[in-house]
Image: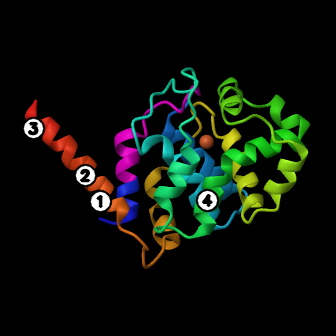
Amino acid sequence: MSIVDVIFDLFAHRGSAAYLGEPVSQLEHALQTAWQGEREGAPDTLIAAGLLHDLGYILFEVPENIADRGFDCRHEELGAAWLSGQFPDTVVEPVRLHVAAKRYLCAVDADYQTHLSAASLQSLALQGGPFSAAEARGFISLPYAGEAVQLRRWDEMAKVVKAKPPDLESYRLLLEKVKLKAPMNSLVYDFQANEYSHKLSNARNK
Ligand code: FE
């Protein structure tokens, strides 16, 4: 099973979950984010990062009201850790940095914060709030920070009810193209195998 098949499987099983407090599903949000990148002529790696940026929310069964419970599951770190070794840094790092990019944009763009949704403002508070001027300078000097800021702007635009982005299948070739040809770990497969066999034995025991 290739990493791309595992990702498609995740979206098939958990992609219909609500995108925490927003009116679209996780899959709709992912597709709309990638589509924004595509329409701006972004490189394939950043389109892939757009598609995968919130994967950390569906790797585990994160409760949809997690922010109401005052908890930040660090989905950007979970997603990046899961993808690293399977995709290049040009995909993994914008995913890791997309929450920091929100904190950055709130610090440097007065208009940006006024356009955040209620759910995004709620998670911003849990994620540490806007960066200070010094934190913002430190952030933007990081490798891939510029790409993460681009991705973040698409992220905010990707919450449109009844948008008609291309379907998931249309991104299969792009993901196959950008993934590492020689994956550096097999943890992903072990994790999935364990989870699926756990589910299967649970189902059998019912
Ligand atoms: Fe997002």
Specify the farthest residue to the left.
205
Q: Mark 4 sits on what residue? A: 47
Name the kind of residue labelled 2 in the image: Asn
Could you tell me residue 119's position as x and y percent?
A: 65, 26
37 or 107, which lies in front?
Answer: 107
Could you tell me residue 22's position as x and y percent?
A: 59, 28
Magenta stretch, residue numbers: 8-23
Which part of the image, by quadrant, shows the C terminus?
top left
- Which is in the foreground here, disc 3 or disc 4? 3
Residue 107, image quadrant: top right
Would residue 67 be found to the left or right of residue 113 on screen?
left
Q: Secondary structure at mark 3?
A: helix
Question: Is residue 20 shown above or below 90?
Answer: above
Q: Is residue 126 a member of the stretch shown in magenta?
A: no
Q: Mark 2 sits on what residue? A: 194
CA distance separating discs 3 and 2: 15 Å
Q: What is the crowding at mark 3: few (fewer than 14 residues within 10 Å), some, or many (at least 20)? A: few
Q: Is residue 9 a member of the stretch shown in magenta?
A: yes
Q: Which mark is residue 204?
A: 3
Q: In the image, ligand 1 is in what quadrant?
A: top right
Q: Earlier in the sequence, mark 4 or mark 2?
A: 4
Residue positioned 68% across, 31% down in the render: 120
Name the kind of residue labelled 4 in the image: Ile
149 or 143, which lies in front?
Answer: 143
Q: Secondary structure at mark 2?
A: helix
Question: Is residue 127 shown above or below 39?
Answer: above
Q: Earlier in the sequence, mark 1 or mark 3?
A: 1
Q: What is the crowding at mark 1: few (fewer than 14 residues within 10 Å), some, or many (at least 20)? A: few
